[in-house]
Amino acid sequence: MTQAWLKNAIKKINADFNRSADTHLIKANILGIDEIDIYFKDEAAHPTGSLKHRLARSLFLYALCNGWINEKSTIIEASSGSTAVSEAYFARMLGLKFIAVMPKNTSKEKIAKIEFYGGKCHLVENATHVSNEAEKLSKNRNCHFMDQFTYAERATDWRGNNNIAESIFQQMGQERFPIPSWVVIGAGTGGTSATIGRYIRYQGYETKVCVVDPDNSVFYDYYNGKASDETILKQGSCIEGIGRPRVEKSFIKNIIDHMIHVPDSASLAAMHFLANELSYARGPSTGTNFYGVYEIVQKMKMKGEKGSIVMLFCDSSSRYLKTYYDKEWMKENNFELEPYYSDLKKFFS
């Protein structure tokens, strides 16, 4: 790798960051919870449309500064889609080839977006095999496995440097409850929860981190001592972007204060509630986050607690129009949104 190419590659990524505005922190207008304020950190506003844009940028800079990739490298990544979209964007920026290893049932919209950025999609039948398949492909000459599930928790500077945690707390500075009681997030790699949890401890805040976990994910059981780091589930999560069949190296359970298991139908009911009742059409992992917020608000109200809660908008609805936003597809896949939708509507009305 020539030093000139390395210097120019890092400069291009930093220039892209410099051109990008920070994502909005939106205060929810919800009746009936007067002493609890809910905020949405809208990560769908990134150039590649999801929270994973931050991760992809960090992974590329981490790999470049470690000397793992050069001007001839082919980048390989295991992903459920959104990370691959963002990595394809940065690979094209640097003139590198990119291959995404993804489950066969990944939304067609995500596949199309990866191909739009010049990447190729290598689809596997079983979602539990994506990491192993990506590792196999990386054995080829000049290939580098980016491996988000290992490096997500260390590629981002958790002390600050414009990470998502620093952004949230700066944007909360003028609010009624500027230090959130809770930050609610899902875990795919575990990188975001690690970054936010470490930042909170580093700054000495009282904020607690709640990680929500969908069906067919091992994280919740692992956190509660019912699964080990050797456990591998036979089936992966259908909530794209979060949940894993195995415990990933980036998942750091000791910095998490609370976990909530959210059934898939509850995630989708919350996703549709946000779209229909609050006019925020986002993806299914955002629904998982919001259902977690709903459970926390219930408990806070019962205890008479005041405070603020921040959750993430992970990506937009545009990637799921033919799946989670399609009524026929939902029926075919046996998702029942009642009574979850009715409970949400009753509570927040």
Image (cartoon, grey):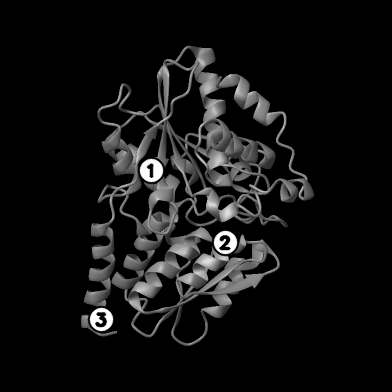
Q: Secondary structure at mark 3?
A: helix
Residue located beneath label 3 in the image? 5
Give how far across and how far down residue 187 sits, in percent.
52, 48
Cα distance in 3D space between marks 2 and 3: 33 Å
| Foreground: disc 1 or disc 2 | 2
3 or 1: tag closer to the N-terminus: 3
Which residue is at the front of the view, 32 or 177? 32
Res. 193 visible in picture: yes
Cα distance in 3D space between marks 3 and 1: 33 Å
Residue located beneath label 2 in the image? 109
2 or 3: tag closer to the N-terminus: 3
Residue at position x 65%, y 52% in the image: 237
Which residue is at the front of the view, 168 or 135? 168
Q: What is the three-letter code of the residue carrying label 1?
A: Ile
Splitting the image into 4 quarters, where does residue 152 fall? bottom left
Q: What is the three-letter code of the residue carrying label 3?
A: Trp
Residue at position x 51%, y 79% in the image: 138
Tell me, for residue 196, which label it has, or none.
1
Which residue is at the front of the view, 97 or 254? 97
- Above or below — where is 305 with respect to 251? above
The quadrant in which the N terminus is found is bottom left
Residue at position x 32%, y 31% in the image: 205
The quadrant in which the C terminus is found is top right
How many C-alpha atoms fall within 10 Å of the one at disc 1: few (<14), some, or many (≥20)?
Answer: many
